[in-house]
């Protein structure tokens, strides 16, 4: 039987295959385009994301929003498409990486979508455990850890050991908020309207929390007054504010959680530090910024965007640990 770990993210779906061809076998946009009139599917995955902001006759839909399945039919079609690409055969076991405290109703949605995509046995493990496993954090029953995963639509923060989550929460804040905020900022500063894809590219190319970082990226947009196309060079320091507003918000909640923890746990956290994963954690300078703000060590995953699904693959290969961590 083939086993898969699936991180069905707001922006990107990541799939890990256990067994032959062991490793991450897919990373594609969680995106579908449909014909605006007939609602027929036009494209899926990365192909669909390319169309964002470029056509008038198709709607671009993200069937997972802020970590929850919001369009079951399209989510099912998308997973089916992804598994077709991977070339799955026969009976398959799937582990979904889900947000902290994912409700029964939400899990029921995953189960229906998985069934539509032809997946057989399905289980669920919460993101913080998987992020820690993906980063090889020395967490155990007696050794707790503090992890923050900053994705596109949500951020999960949790203090936990393999005995359970001591304190944690999900915030509907992530890279998507930063992109929208960058659009507003460019409009105000340069009187230039840019699209979502451009804002994301700008953030991922020169977005930085390194003080006085001076990298630049040329963005194309439309002059708000004249309506004519225009371009402007944007520097890292120009977009620090629309990014740091959200990072600061996340860190305020991190501090709240740390303050609420029992003293012994809090002391262990302060010694071991904080573990950062999720695509946004790839931003240069984020680790040092978090370290400065929280006055504790911050460790950024080697491949932040893949940490969770990698942890999913690791837990799939350890039946005893899987039994301990899966949501019942
Ligand atoms: N170098 C980078 N700097 C900043 N942000 C980045 C970088 N690379 C990717 N991102 C952002 O990371 C986000 C995607 O990360 P990830 O794949 O962890 O999210 P997701 O799992 O799809 O979403 P969620 O966990 O919220 O459901 C996007 O917002 C993307 O723009
Ligand atoms: Mg994610």
Image (tube, rainbow, N blue to C red):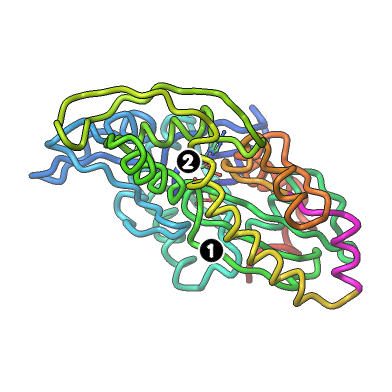
Residue 200: horizontal and vertical position, in percent? 43, 36
Q: Main secondary structure of the magenta part?
A: helix
Identify the mark at residue 225; answer none if there is no mark.
Answer: none
Residue at horizontal 81 percent and vertical 64 percent from the top: 161
Residue 149: horizontal and vertical position, in percent? 63, 52
Q: Calculate the distance from the C-alpha at mark 1 to the C-alpha at mark 2.
A: 18 Å
Find residue 224 and report its image quarter.
Answer: top left
Name the residue tied to disc 2: 12
* Disc 1 and disc 2 in contact, CB within 8 angstroms: no
Q: Is mark 2 within 8 Å of ligand 1?
A: yes
Q: Secondary structure at mark 1?
A: strand
Query: Is 270 part of what is drawn in magenta?
Result: yes
Residue at horizontal 28 percent and vertical 37 percent from the top: 191
Depth check, mark 1 against mark 2: the one in front is: 1
Quarter of the rendering occupied by the C terminus: bottom right
Judge by depth and name the residue closer to the eye, 264 or 142: 264
**How many residues crowd mark 1 within 10 Å: few (<14), some (14–19), many (20+)?**
some
Find residue 167 and report its image quarter.
Answer: bottom right
Q: Is residue 129 left or right of residue 221?
A: right
Q: Which contiguous range is marked in magenta?
A: 264-275
Residue 314, above or below 70? above
Judge by depth and name the residue closer to the eye, 273 or 15: 273
Identify the mark at residue 171; answer none if there is no mark.
Answer: 1
Comes first in the chain, label 1 or label 2: 2
Residue 21, above or below 93? above
Residue 277, above or below 55? below
Query: Is 280 part of what is drawn in magenta?
Result: no
Q: Does residue 195 appear in the picture of this structure? A: yes
Judge by depth and name the residue closer to the eye, 225 or 83: 225
């Amino acid at each position: 039987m083939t086993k898969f770990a699936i991180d069905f993210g707001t922006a990107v779906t990541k799939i890990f295959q256990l067994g032959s061809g062991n490793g991450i076998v897919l990373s594609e946009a969680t995106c579908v385009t449909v014909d605006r009139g007939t609602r027929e599917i036009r494209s899926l995955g990365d192909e669909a994301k390319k169309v964002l902001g470029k056509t008038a006759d198709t709607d671009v839909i993200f069937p997972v929003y802020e970590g929850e399945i919001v369009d079951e039919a399209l989510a099912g079609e998308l997973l089916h498409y992804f598994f077709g690409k991977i070339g799955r055969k026969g009976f398959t076991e799937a582990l979904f990486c889900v947000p902290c405290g994912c409700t029964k109703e939400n899990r029921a949605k995953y189960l229906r979508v998985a069934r539509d995509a032809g997946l057989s046995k399905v289980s669920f493990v919460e993101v913080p455990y998987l992020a820690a496993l993906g980063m090889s954090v020395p967490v155990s029953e007696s050794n707790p850890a503090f992890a923050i995963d900053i994705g596109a639509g949500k951020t999960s923060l949790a203090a936990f050991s393999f005995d359970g989550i001591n304190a944690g929460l999900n915030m509907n804040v992530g890279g998507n908020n930063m992109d929208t905020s960058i659009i507003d900022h460019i409009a105000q500063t340069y009187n230039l309207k840019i699209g979502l894809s451009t804002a994301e590219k700008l953030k991922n190319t020169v977005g930085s929390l390194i003080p006085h970082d001076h990298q630049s990226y040329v963005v194309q947009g439309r002059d708000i007054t004249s309506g004519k196309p225009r371009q402007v060079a944007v520097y890292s320091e120009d977009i620090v504010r629309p990014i740091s507003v959200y990072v600061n918000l996340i860190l305020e909640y991190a501090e709240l959680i740390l303050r609420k923890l029992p003293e012994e746990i809090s002391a262990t956290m302060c010694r071991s530090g904080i573990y950062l994963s999720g695509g946004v954690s790839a931003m240069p300078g984020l680790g040092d910024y978090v370290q400065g703000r929280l006055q504790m060590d911050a460790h950024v995953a080697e491949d932040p965007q893949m940490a969770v699904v990698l942890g999913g693959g690791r837990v799939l290969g350890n039946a005893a640990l899987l039994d301990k961590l899966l949501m019942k």
